[in-house]
Image: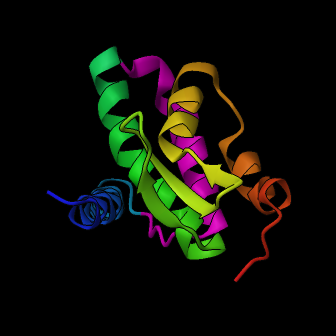
Amino acid sequence: MNKIADSMELQEDAQLVIDVLSEKEEVQLDYSADSVSWLDTYIEQHREELDERDKSLLQEKFGAYLGESIRHNYGGRWVKGSDGNWMVVFNEDHQASPFELIGEHLDHNTALADVFEHLPDHCKLRNN
């Protein structure tokens, strides 16, 4: 499978998050900053209930959703790094690692919404 087909799977995973959570939690996620903030709170509320298997699955699915949120709001494209990990790349000097960000939030309660909000400052991006 080529990289374009793989990145389509990431977009499908992001849509799956929207579909499942909209049904389960009665929320309408739309890749906005408010949706990322909602996801941040959702993880905080459920972190203690999660085992390693749950965390791994959520990192995979929520990472795709966060990456798509980044792309929808700030641009960039999915690129698979030489280490096999997916990143959203803006230019050769700036990228975001949404799967790592979700993993850190699942394990250490990093401020996901704050990271998302300040990404343009860090990467010198302009909102679309």
Query: Do we see residue 106 in this rendering?
Result: yes
State the residue in front, 117 or 49: 117
Query: Do we see residue 68 in this rendering?
Result: no
State the residue in front, 88 or 14: 88
Report the span colored magenta. Answer: 27-50
How many numbered callouts?
A: 0
Rendered residue at 49%/73% (across/down): 30
Q: What percent of the width, then of the height, locates residue 25?
A: 38, 54
Q: Main secondary structure of the magenta part?
A: helix
Q: What percent of the width, then of the height, locates residue 34?
A: 64, 64
Q: What percent of the width, then of the height, locates residue 81?
A: 44, 44
State the residue in front, 51 or 11: 11
Q: Is residue 62 left or right of residue 56?
A: right
Q: What percent of the width, then of the height, locates residue 40?
A: 59, 44
Q: In this view, does 22 lie to the left or right of 114?
A: left
Rendered residue at 35%/56% (across/down): 21
Q: In this view, does 48 lie to the left or right of 127?
A: left
| Residue 36 lies in the magenta-colored region | yes
Residue that lies at the very extreme toward the bottom in this rendered image:
128
Q: Is residue 12 above or below residue 40?
A: below
Q: Is residue 85 above or below residue 9?
A: above
Q: In which quarter of the image is the N terminus?
A: bottom left
Rendered residue at 35%/63% (across/down): 18
Q: Quadrant of the C terminus?
A: bottom right
State the residue in front, 30 or 96: 96
Rendered residue at 54%/69% (across/down): 71
Q: In this view, does 53 lie above or below 5?
A: above
| Residue 103 lies in the magenta-colored region | no
Q: Is residue 51 above or below residue 110?
A: above
